[in-house]
Amino acid sequence: MPKNKGKGGKNRRRGKNEGDEKRELIFKEDGQEYAQVLRMLGNGRLEAQCIDGVKRLCHIRGKMRKKVWVNTGDIILLGLRDYQDEKADVILKYLADEARSLKAYGELPDSIRVNETDTFEEERDENDDFFDFDDVDQI
C-alpha cells in the first residue's frame, strides 16, 4: 500500500471558507434581472421566476458551481441573454440579509418572501392530496 506524500486531501484543496466578511451590495444593471429560484433541475440548471414576470431556465455559471450553493427560494441576479429571452445565466446569489436590504431599497417587490422555501402558493396542483384525520374514526 503506497504512503501518502501529499499535504492533505479534499478538504485542503477546498480551502477555507472566507465568506465571513461583509460584501458590497450589488444592484442590477441593464441586461440583468432579479429572480427567485422556483426549483432546481440538476446539472447546474434551475428554473427561476423573474421580477418582470417571466419564468426562465437558468444556468449556474462555472465560477459559482460547487462554491456557492443555490437553493429553492433564494434571491439571485440573472444575466439576460440577447438572443434567448427564455434562458438566463446566474451571476450572483444574494444572502438573506442582502435580499432583505434590496427589498428595503425598493428593488424587490413586496410580494417576494425572503428566506422561505414555499415561495409560490399558486403553484400547487389540484392533484395534491390533503388528509382529513377526522374520517379515521368512521373506519
Image: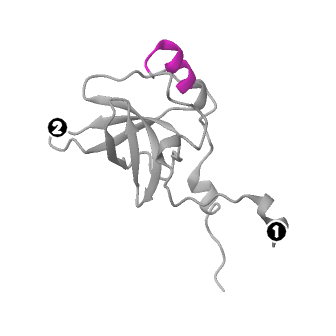
Magenta region = 98-107
Residue beneath disc 1: 138
Extreme residue toward the bottom, this view: 1
Q: Which of marks 2 and 1 is nearer the N terminus?
A: 2
Q: Does 56 appear above or below 52?
A: below
Q: Which residue is drawn at 40% across and 61% down?
A: 43
Q: Give the amino acid type for the residue marked by disc 2 in the picture.
A: Asp
Q: Give the amino acid type for the residue marked by disc 1 in the picture.
A: Gln
Q: Nearer the viewer, residue 139 or 116?
A: 139
Q: Residue at x 25, y 45 (%)?
A: 86
Q: Where is residue 63 in the image (x, y as percent from the top left)?
A: 40, 45
Q: How far apart are marks 2 and 1 (CA)?
A: 61 Å
Q: Which residue is drawn at 51% across and 48% down?
A: 67
Q: Residue at x 47, y 51 (%)?
A: 39
Q: In this view, does 19 lie to the left or right of 34?
A: right
The disc label shown at residue 82, or none: 2
Q: Which of 20 and 133 is in front in this view?
A: 133
Which class describes the residues within 10 Å of circle 1: few (<14), some (14-19), or many (20+)? few
The verdict on residue 11 being magenta is: no
Q: Position of residue 54 (x, y in %)?
A: 31, 38
Q: Does 134 appear above or below 54?
A: below
Q: Nearer the viewer, residue 34 or 90?
A: 34
Q: Is residue 33 left or right of residue 131?
A: left
Q: Position of residue 65 (x, y in %)?
A: 45, 51
Extreme residue toward the right, this view: 137
Extreme residue toward the top, this view: 105
Q: Nearer the viewer, mark 2 or mark 1?
A: 1
Quadrant of the frame with the N terminus: bottom right
Give the tally of numbered discs.
2
Which class describes the residues within 10 Å of circle 2: few (<14), some (14-19), or many (20+)? few
